[in-house]
């Protein structure tokens, strides 16, 4: 019986690991774009897991006088993704209205430390959700041929890879900050 129980536990562990190490293309996307959407969403879920239960004091916590608040970092992730939306889909930079909306979060630093405070984690996650929903809707209209196209020396694929790696870098930063409360 002990042998069977060990085998059952081992089988469940293997099944869990196998379920986690497969990139599945979400419905409605071409192959390469679908892989990117899956990876972007996987990272976003992990970022959200780190911060979803934070109280206001934790959202506004500053590790030191040069650090950024957790809420500001989440807003920064959304701002960066919003920038790459206009860059890849419209082949432009932010217009004046978009700069006003995203500039502080995009640049972070002293201004963000002062201005991006006093909002719940859900406030920032809602902004992140809205931007991601738009990204996914826009990517659904494109194909892998578009993904390979270049603009100013950068392929659309590389641009969205950069959004993903940027998200991963800040995920590590968020985890470090949370451990320092």
Image (cartoon, grey):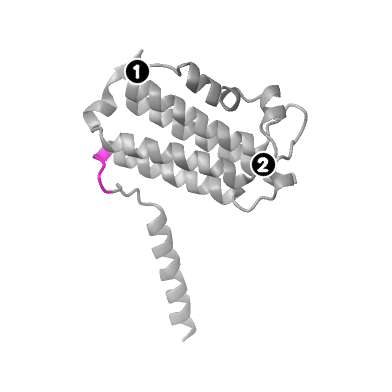
Extreme residue in the front direction: 97
Q: Position of residue 71 (x, y in %)?
A: 63, 38
Q: Are marks 2 and 1 in contact (CB under 8 Å)?
A: no
* Helix, strand or loop for disc 2: helix
Q: Is residue 28 magenta?
A: yes
Sequence-wise, which precedes: disc 2 or disc 1? 1
Extreme residue in the right direction: 65
Name the residue carrying label 1: 91
Rendering quarter of residue 41? top left
Q: 78 or 156, which lies in front?
A: 78
Instruction: Please rate how many residues cluster around mark 2, counting C-alpha atoms within 10 Å: few if below 14, some from 14 to 19, many from 20.
Output: few
Task: Measure the alpha-carbon separation of dots 2 and 1.
Answer: 35 Å
Q: 72 or 177, which lies in front?
A: 72
Name the residue carrying label 2: 176
Determine the residue positioned at 68% across, 32% down.
Answer: 68
Determine the residue positioned at 51% across, 36% down.
Answer: 167
First to last magenta residue range: 27-31
* Helix, strand or loop for disc 1: loop
Residue 90 appears in the rendering: yes
| Relative to 59, residue 88 above or below | above
Determine the residue positioned at 26% across, 41% down.
Answer: 29
Is 149 displayed left or right of 21 in the figure? left
Determine the residue positioned at 43% across, 75% down.
Answer: 8
Extreme residue in the bottom direction: 1
Q: Position of residue 107 (x, y in %)?
A: 59, 22
Q: Position of residue 6 (x, y in %)?
A: 47, 76
């Amino acid at each position: 019986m002990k042998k069977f129980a060990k085998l059952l536990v081992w089988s469940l562990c293997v099944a869990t690991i196998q379920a986690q190490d497969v990139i599945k293309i979400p419905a409605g996307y071409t192959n390469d774009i679908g892989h990117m959407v899956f990876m972007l969403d996987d990272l976003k879920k992990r970022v959200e897991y780190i911060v979803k239960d934070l109280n206001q004091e934790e959202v506004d916590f500053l590790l030191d006088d040069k650090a950024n608040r957790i809420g500001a970092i989440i807003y920064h992730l959304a701002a960066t993704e919003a920038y790459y939306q206009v860059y890849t889909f419209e082949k432009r930079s932010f217009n004046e209205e978009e700069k006003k909306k995203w500039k502080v979060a995009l640049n972070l630093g002293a201004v963000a430390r002062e201005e991006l405070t006093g909002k719940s984690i859900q406030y920032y996650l809602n902004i992140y959700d809205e931007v991601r929903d738009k990204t996914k809707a826009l990517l659904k209209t494109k194909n892998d041929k578009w993904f390979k196209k270049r603009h100013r020396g950068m392929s659309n694929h590389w641009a969205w890879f950069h959004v993903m790696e940027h998200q991963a870098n800040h995920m590590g930063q968020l985890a470090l900050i949370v451990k320092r409360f």
